[in-house]
Image: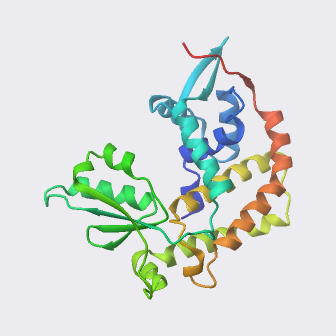
Amino acid sequence: MTGEESLRPQSLMLTFLGDQVLGRDVCVYSGSVIDVFARAGIGEQATRSTLTRMVGRDLLRRQREGRRMYFGLTERSEAVLRDGERRIWQTGAVNRHWDGTWTLLGFSLPESWQRQRHDLRSQLTWSGFGPLFNGLWIAPGEVDVSALVAELGLSAHVKVFRAHADTGMDIGQMIEETWELSDLAGLYEAFVRRWQPWEDELPDADDALVLRLRLQTEWLRIVRRDPRLPVKHLPDDWPADQAEKTFRAVHDRLSPLARDASERLLDLVPARPQA
């Protein structure tokens, strides 16, 4: 993952909204968003088109105040942001409390359903599953995939079970064969290299706001890709713990300056009830 990838406007916009709007019952002025995003190297046109697309996807709503346009959250975006908040601050990157349960999902689709097969595999990967065998996928813990399967219209073709490994099975080896651990470890290691210097440095206040947005956007992207495999079955030098410590330390260091900057730079108004 490159730094550029992590700064895709919609990803950064969701982080910005989670940071500044979620839980406050406010709307933010479009000009404020444009100003902050310009500091992140994103042009006005790209920011405006991101706002427009997110309104079209029911992730934002508009609220006019005089000649100014403000943007607030919808039920859909609030659910997305609450999920991200849980993933960062509650679930975390290291699974130390696994109870031995696995979720097994088997599927059998007609040979011609290539698109449906691709969509299902993509969604399963996003939900923390790995391919144990062809047509049989596995994830640690109890994962509820009923909504995902129903949305794809595949409920009749999928079977889901809860399971425990038989005594003597090498779970560590199974994990190495099922998930691309080296790719995930590389993401955590690159994150530490990029962000550890900021544990000891302080930027200008206005830069701190953008840095914290980028920090959270990159971190959430990584932990969403992490299936949260039980740490006791991962390599001893697994880098997620160090990466999480770096994330929290830099976040704490940037936060006071970022709060000061947001108070200066952002024009917020109370959100009115929607008609």
- Residue 216 in view of the camera: yes
Which quarter of the figure has residue 239?
A: bottom right
Q: Position of residue 48 (x, y in %)?
A: 56, 32
Q: How many marks?
A: 0
Between 12 and 141, the residue placed more toward the observer is: 141
Between 257 and 76, the residue placed more toward the observer is: 76
Q: Residue at x 38, y 45 (%)?
A: 147
Quarter in which the C terminus is drawn: top right
Q: Position of residue 229 (x, y in %)?
A: 53, 71
- Residue 193 in view of the camera: no
From this view, report whether residue 232 is shown above or below residue 213.
below
Between 169 and 222, the residue placed more toward the observer is: 169
From this view, report whether residue 105 is shown above or below residue 156.
below
Q: Position of residue 246 (x, y in %)?
A: 74, 67
Which quarter of the figure has residue 87?
A: bottom right
Q: Residue at x 50, y 65 (%)?
A: 227
> Is 70 on the left-hand or right-hand side of 137?
right
Between 76 and 158, the residue placed more toward the observer is: 158
Quarter in which the N terminus is drawn: bottom right
From this view, report whether residue 63 is shown above or below residue 115.
above
In this view, which residue lies farthest toward the front? 167
